[in-house]
Image: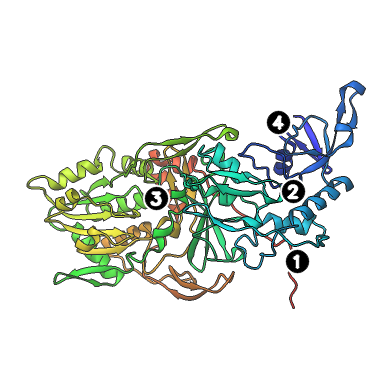
Amino acid sequence: MPSITINGTVCEFEAGEKVIDVADRCGVEIPKYCYHPGLSIPAQCRICLAEIWAPNPRNDNKLEPMMGGKLLPTCATDASDGMVVYANSPKAVANQKSVMEYLLINHPLDCPVCDQAGECTLQDFSYKYGRGVSRFEETKLKQPKKDLGPNTWIYSDRCIMCTRCVRFAREIPGTGELMIDGRGNKSEIDVFPGVPLDNELSANVIDLCPVGALLDKDFLFAQRVWFLKRNATIDGLTSSGDNLWAEHNQGRIYRFKPRTNLDLNTWWITDEVRYSWKHVHAEHRVKTPRRRQHGAQLEAEWTKALDLTVETLRADGASLVMISPMLSSEDAYLLATAARTIDPKAILAMGPVPTQGEDKEFANPRAGRPFVKRAEKAPNARGVRRVLDAVAPGDWLDYDAAVKRLDKDGSDITGVLLTGNYPSEWATDEFKGALSGTRVVALDLLENALTSLAEVVLPASSWLEQDGSFENADGVIQAYTQAIPTQHESKGVGQIALDLSARAEGRSLSLPGGGYADFIVDEGPGQVPAASQTLSLPRAERFVASDTRTAMAEAHDGLRALVDEIVLPPVEGTREPDVELVEL
């Protein structure tokens, strides 16, 4: 392959790649502001300029400086074989210092109160490439804070006019709400009159902003970013399979950010996915197990609630277990297996798969594929179907068929176990009417009409509170990792299924040992990972997603894909601070 030398490092490249792309891939840092791999290239911030030498075919391919030795933008220069790039030469370094000095002329000293502090490239590059002093003695230009739309504030005096946000709005959603108003140092990013920044991808401009100009209203002043930990997760709301970072602290999610995957969501996520974590911390979560006594629901111990569930599914008549497409494949498998352990003739069914409108594609020129917003609002319908086809081939019902079976005159179904985990009310009046005359066990995340009529209620955890895997609309199977501890007294559905199997077989539950706690009430402040208070819940063997996938593949050939084809989340190394920490 052809190669290029950047700051002394030899890097191979493919035809058409820009110098800065090759440098990024090889781990050679070249500072940049206006450049983003998913957007057009204006080459206007000028901090990525470098000296570039290349073989001259008119002079026996001798290395000569391009453009007579002028500095060239590495973001807009195609790599060519034998090229030598100096982004650390005295001339290039002098340019970097000048650009940083210029950008900071009117920039306010807002770092102590700025949400971007700690992940700001203006801070980072000022430390790495700036002068450390300012020669500017005039009065700084003040610009206003503005409301751009439902999700976004702009602090205009922090803006460095990289125009990433303007190009994004024009090129990806194609809505073009943003513009540059004014000229020179009076330039401001603004919306057209009466046209707020309110498209389905609008909050991506917050991620794109390299400084603290564009800020998320939802995250504003909520948390210092250096306290946040992050885990690789998957979109748990739609069938897109978008890759995400779940950022959290003290057992609470604070935001989702897109995790680059050029085969799926590329660099973007929709606003509905970005804010899809909020129901995880909703006030109306199911917090404790409950059982019905004398017509009222009372709090119950886990063991008692599980025993009543087994009793309900073993009562005279048939039992039906409805497995939600919001659950992971591992949860679905263990729950289906537990149902057949309790009642070998249990009827298995899949819950409703909500849809809203149709799939919508957005232009994504530099990705080579469009970005797709999915109409199907369930993350794992295909994974649950795969599991049911393996566990009960040809012997399970879809949602409509299950409702008809329940609503049939003289139905023999007396016990029903329902799973939900939908972010909102999901039961229709028809479905609630079909449940009349049956004993219902509701295994759910949020309080709803079904939990209020159930004989037994079991609190379930969300996908952010355990490991698992989803299969998206394109058939891609991806694993995700637990981000936060289980909330309140909930358990993962897979753990509940293991506990049900144990109680059905007459085995007792026990408190976990070895320092493992199912539930963390509160972490220590800041980055302290240890729990200040823990609550252990009785359980059978501990649910481990990877072990469950292995067992699934060994038991059913149709589930081997969960081991052979699964895409595992990345393993992050320890993130080190740029500045040396000194103990005082």
Does the CB distance between marks 2 and 1 fall below 8 Å?
no
Which of 106/226 is in front? 106
**Tag 3: amino acid:** Ser
**Which mark is in front, 4 or 3?**
4
Q: Which residue is mark 2?
A: 31
Rendered-image quadrant of the C terminus: bottom right
**Tag 4: amino acid:** Glu
Q: Secondary structure at mark 2?
A: loop
Query: Residue at coordinates 31% horizontally, 49% vertically from top-left?
Result: 324
Within-10-Å neighbours for mark 3: few <14, some 14–19, many 20+: many
**Which mark is in front, 2 or 1?**
2
Task: Please state if 233 lies on the left or on the right of 77 as rendered.
Answer: left
Where's residue 266, x and y in %? 55, 41
Task: Please state if 61 lies on the left or on the right of 254 as rendered.
Answer: right
**Which mark is in front, 2 or 4?**
2
**Which mark is in front, 3 or 2?**
2
**Tag 1: amino acid:** Glu
Where's residue 480, x and y in %? 49, 51
- Mark 2 and mark 4: Cα distance apart in space: 22 Å
**307 versus 51 height, above or below:** below
Q: Which residue is mark 4?
A: 14
Residue 580 tag number:
1
Which of 582/214 is in front? 214
Q: Secondary structure at mark 3?
A: loop
Residue 328 tag number:
3
